[in-house]
Amino acid sequence: MGPRDDPERCMWNADSEQLRGGRVTRVAMMREKSPLRFSEVLDLWREDHTFREFFSDYLSKLPYGSFRWETPPITNRTVDRPFEFVAIDAPNLERAVDANAFANQFRAAGALHSVLTFPNLRGDAIMIVPAPRAQVSAYGHLGAFLRLAPPEQCDQLWQAIANAIELRLGTAPLWLSTAGMGVAWLHVRIDSRPKYYAHQPYCTMK
């Protein structure tokens, strides 16, 4: 039985909708036919390798070479809403990767840490950043990372995201996304406002 026939893996599926002429894909994650809540996805990112593998594989096969990834805001009151995200076609992310973007953080962390979590310079967002563990081209954006980086590092990224959100979840909304136009190295943002969001419905969602 191959990995795609794994009965646990087959539990998971996705319900997708094309928006803006196919430039945006909105996705809900499902356990068989039941939508997963955000709280469940956080638990699965943290604890379930099979789900993390499914999630990475699904994103890696989206019909965009490069894309932005955004979720609705979450608080401790809304974390039990159905989980969804959008992937937004972003061909402008296909550019030279800046290997020096987070070099100071990588040096300080040392070789043992494949994924780093630290505040941004302004202190109003948390960054989750993979360290270089493959060819530099694997780190330009989320699509490249999920297709080219070591599978265990992709796995660790989702765990780090879940852990960082769990530590900060409260009454103030958190926006989870990747943007990437300012810094040419993949960094996931947990932000206090939708500073770089492109999907406007999520910017105003309560």
Image (cartoon, rainbow, N blue to C red):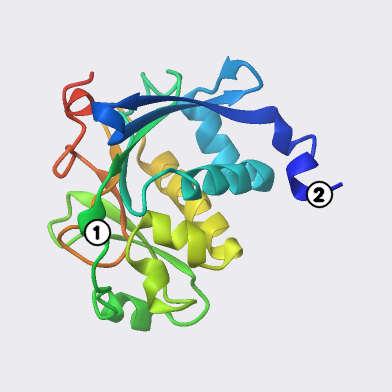
The image quadrant that residue 4 belongs to is top right
Query: How many marks on residues?
Result: 2
Rounded to the nearest angstrom, the CA distance separating label 2 from label 1 is: 34 Å
Residue under pointer 1? 93
Does residue 58 appear to the left or right of 181 in the view shown?
right
Q: Is residue 117 above or below residue 42?
A: below
Percent position (x, y) of residue 47? 63, 44
Residue under pointer 2? 2
Say what amino acid the circle numbered 1 marks. Answer: Leu
Q: Earlier in the sequence, mark 2 or mark 1?
A: 2
Percent position (x, y) of residue 143? 41, 55
Percent position (x, y) of residue 187? 31, 59
Q: Is residue 58 above or below residue 103?
A: above
The answer to whether residue 3 is visible is yes
Does residue 145 appear to the left or right of 89 in the view shown?
right
Residue occupying the far right of the picture: 1
